[in-house]
Image: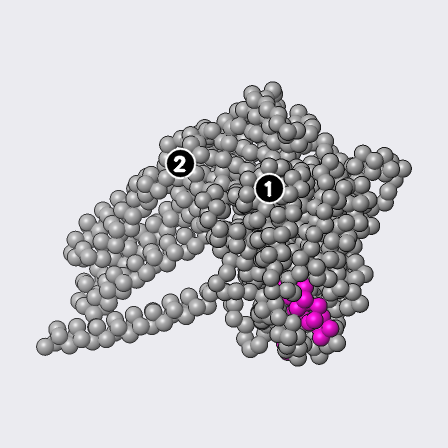
């Protein structure tokens, strides 16, 4: 009976200890969680007015997802002034009445600091009057109708307006497709006619021939027969031409389908507005059988003009498209990128407005509007992933656009682009440059021609590197350039190498329709970047970097890609990931002030391959010894204390094994800092000491006949040891990515 009572009492004590330990663990875990939920209503609210379909992969959903991606980034970084951002999203369904109601609701909501939207122009136009009357700052990154920002000091736009789009596109055709006559198709409403008027005026300035100008009326119920008649008229012309279409998406999709459905007896190029660059355009074309059987049948070679295209731009652009694809498992349209930028710009404006101690929503909104006005020129612009954003006196942002065309449903940039000139002052050489088409003027903005060179790096093999002595590895790869016209690739400079690397002569060169393709094979030592902190799950990033050392990034950029198919690696390693991007660099030999003044920056291609260890090799070579030592030490709690000599032998064996394993690993790691593997070794030393003193304590209790304490110490060890080990492993793995 006495033994039973002791066991019962012991079980109660053990239960109390376990409950207390569990509560402490849960409380500690909750305290370690990020503080995403602020106390009270400690948030900044932003209204989002859009048009969307929950079941659609439309560009309008790109708007929402782009904003949410930006919101997550800001909130994870601590928010603004310590406050998290919350979105209030409303769907105007592209309906004027509903847009007015949403604008009124947003204006009355004293939580909302500013509004992003609306997506379409008509809701933006009708909502604009309400926002203006109630002094609410609004920013759109998609509604391009000129009238939206006219005489409305509260409405801002981060993309060019229709006039700029049309002028830019007409200028491009005048400079690059001068021999092609033009056919213009447009809706008869005011919105599309305003685009057509500017476009027509611009191409006439370049003496381009307009062979036909056709319109249709969507206010009539019989739109389809009108579109069929238009396409039949064009086919009867039987003439090489550029077909410019200004239409809403349903009519645009139908016109493209009709034009490309019958066999082409003549060559033509279709050019659309930004509507043709949305995911909805491709999605609707994909409903047709021919497009399903042959992806790109309808969309291939369709030219568009947009603020952003994947595969070209600054480092932020590459990072955004990569993150978006990883998050939503698809490539977005320009709308996602533009609204991401617009949200980030809004956050900067809120921060610059210094509203922490401000009372009254009207004064807060006015200060935010004034902060937006602070982005007034290129020097004071917001530097986003789509480029520099700043507003003119109308609240517009008429900035650089990118020309691209579809290939297999994916937008790729044209070989020739036009970028805002760093120095807007025209010098004595300006006339000659203008005659040579090196510079052009669009809407009082001076642009210079910029060449795009497609670049592909195909990695063939990576030789084994020595972790202790040699922070570089020999890489064998093909380097391919594809460009229009001329390109001096002999001035390509490789960075991140141990010694100078020369391209030499190309092993293959082809020319077709003015496009040259050159192929080089390079074998050189490139330095790598190592992440030893997570050893033995460490990664090593090999990066091939190069830039042109003569042509600055206002005249030359690259559209990079990397191929690692069938790459030869050394045993025990595998490809973990691959990445490519463009980075802005400068010549370190030139003074910084001169670099800034004359914009002496270069676009550098970064193509990287990250290697990681094969999992099976890691487990057996590095993890298994640790696991064995953990289990040996844990087994001590199940050995009778009478066999104390066996316990001492096990602890001694673990210490010797741990020391041997530690020094063996040192031969593989450069140790500028403590890595996880090293921490594990010291952790085992600590566990060995813990088990040693724990065993002595249990032995003392046993000798003194203190059975309750002896059993409590043993049970505490049986339960506590795994908790300690699991906690250590969890903390160690937390930082491994």
**Which of label 2 and label 1 is nearer to you?**
1
Quadrant location, the N terminus: bottom left
| Quadrant hosting residue 678 | top left
Residue at horizontal 37 percent and vertical 54 percent from the top: 729
Determine the residue positioned at 52% across, 36% down: 562
SS of the residue under disc 1: loop
Query: Does dot 2 land on a helix, a strand or a loop?
Result: strand
Above or below residue 499? Residue 28 is: below
> Mark 2 highlights which residue?
573
Location of residue 726 in the rendering, given as x and y in whole percent from the top left corner: 34, 57
Decide: few, some or many residues near mark 2? Use Cα within 10 Å; few <14, some 14-19, many ≥20: some
Compared with 85, 213 (above or below) is above
Q: What is the CA distance from the residue labelled 2 to the residue labelled 1?
A: 41 Å
Instruction: Read off the magenta span.
Output: 109-131
Tell me the residue at 71%/79% (across/down).
360
The answer to if 130 sits in the magenta stretch is yes
Q: Which residue is mark 1?
A: 301
Q: Residue at x 80, y 41 (%)?
A: 207
Q: Nearer the viewer, residue 248 or 382?
A: 248
Q: Is residue 221 visible?
A: yes
- Is residue 259 highlighted in magenta? no
Residue pushed farthest left?
1
């Amino acid at each position: 009976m006495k033994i039973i009572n002791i066991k019962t009492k012991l079980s109660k004590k053990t239960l109390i200890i376990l409950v207390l330990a569990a509560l402490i663990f849960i409380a500690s875990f909750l305290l370690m969680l990020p503080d995403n939920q602020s106390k009270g209503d400690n948030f900044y609210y932003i209204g989002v007015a859009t048009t969307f379909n929950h079941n659609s992969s439309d560009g309008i959903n790109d708007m929402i997802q782009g904003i949410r991606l930006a919101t997550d980034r800001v909130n994870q970084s601590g928010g603004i002034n310590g406050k998290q951002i919350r979105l209030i999203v409303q769907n105007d369904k592209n309906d004027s009445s509903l847009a007015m109601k949403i604008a009124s609701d947003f204006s009355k909501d004293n939580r909302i600091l500013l509004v992003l939207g609306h997506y379409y122009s008509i809701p933006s136009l009708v909502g604009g009057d309400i926002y203006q009357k109630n002094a609410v700052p609004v920013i759109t990154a998609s509604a391009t109708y000129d009238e939206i920002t006219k005489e409305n000091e509260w409405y801002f736009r981060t993309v060019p307006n229709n006039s700029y789009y049309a002028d830019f596109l007409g200028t491009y055709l005048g400079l690059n497709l001068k021999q092609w006559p033009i056919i213009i198709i447009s809706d008869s409403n005011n919105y599309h006619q305003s685009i057509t008027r500017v476009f027509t005026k611009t191409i006439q300035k370049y003496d381009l021939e307009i062979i036909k100008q056709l319109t249709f009326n969507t206010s009539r119920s019989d739109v389809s027969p009108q579109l069929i008649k238009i396409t039949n008229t064009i086919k009867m012309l039987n003439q090489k031409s550029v077909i410019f279409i200004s239409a809403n998406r349903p009519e645009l999709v139908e016109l493209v389908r009709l034009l490309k459905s019958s066999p082409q007896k003549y060559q033509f190029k279709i050019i659309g507005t930004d509507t043709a660059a949305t995911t909805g355009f491709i999605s609707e074309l994909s409903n047709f059988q021919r497009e399903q059987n042959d992806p790109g049948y309808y969309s291939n070679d369709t030219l568009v003009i947009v603020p952003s295209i994947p595969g070209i731009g600054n480092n932020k652009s590459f990072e955004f498209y990569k993150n978006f694809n990883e998050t939503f498992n698809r490539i977005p349209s320009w709308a996602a990128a533009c609204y991401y930028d617009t949200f980030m710009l809004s956050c900067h404006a809120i921060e610059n407005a210094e509203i922490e101690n401000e009372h009254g929503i009207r004064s807060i909104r006015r200060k935010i509007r004034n902060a937006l006005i602070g982005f007034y020129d290129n020097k004071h612009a917001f530097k986003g992933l789509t480029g520099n954003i700043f507003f003119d006196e109308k609240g517009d942002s008429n900035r650089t656009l990118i020309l691209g065309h579809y290939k297999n449903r994916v937008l790729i940039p044209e070989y020739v682009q036009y970028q805002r000139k760093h120095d807007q002052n025209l010098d004595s050489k300006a006339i000659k440059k203008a005659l040579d088409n090196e510079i052009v003027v669009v809407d009082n903005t001076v642009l210079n021609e910029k060449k795009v060179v497609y670049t592909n790096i195909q990695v063939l093999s990576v030789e084994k590197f020595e972790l202790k002595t040699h922070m570089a590895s020999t890489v064998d790869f093909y380097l391919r350039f594809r460009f229009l016209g001329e390109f001096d690739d002999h001035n390509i400079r490789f960075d991140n190498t141990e010694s100078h690397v020369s391209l030499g002569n190309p092993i293959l060169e082809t020319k077709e329709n003015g496009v040259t393709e050159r192929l080089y094979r390079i074998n050189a030592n490139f330095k790598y970047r190592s992440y030893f902190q997570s050893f033995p799950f460490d990664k090593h990033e090999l990066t091939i970097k190069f830039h042109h050392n003569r042509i600055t990034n206002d005249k030359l950029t690259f559209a990079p890609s990397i191929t690692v198919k069938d790459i030869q690696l050394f045993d025990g390693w595998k490809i973990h990931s691959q990445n490519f991007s463009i980075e802005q660099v400068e010549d370190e030999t030139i003074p910084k002030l001169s670099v800034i003044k004359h914009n002496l920056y270069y676009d550098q291609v970064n193509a990287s391959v990250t290697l990681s260890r094969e999992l099976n090799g890691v487990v057996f070579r590095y993890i298994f010894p640790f696991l064995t030592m953990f289990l040996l030490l844990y087994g001590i709690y199940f050995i009778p204390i009478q066999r104390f000599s066996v316990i001492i032998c096990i602890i001694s064996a673990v210490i010797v094994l741990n020391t041997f394993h530690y020094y063996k690993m040192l031969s593989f790691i450069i140790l500028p800092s403590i890595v996880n593997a090293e921490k594990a070794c010291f952790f085992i030393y600590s566990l060995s000491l813990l088990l040693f003193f724990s065993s002595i304590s249990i032995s003392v209790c046993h000798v003194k006949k203190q059975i309750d304490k002896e059993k409590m110490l043993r049970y505490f060890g049986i339960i506590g040891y795994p908790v300690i080990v699991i906690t250590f492993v969890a903390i160690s793995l937390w930082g491994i990515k």
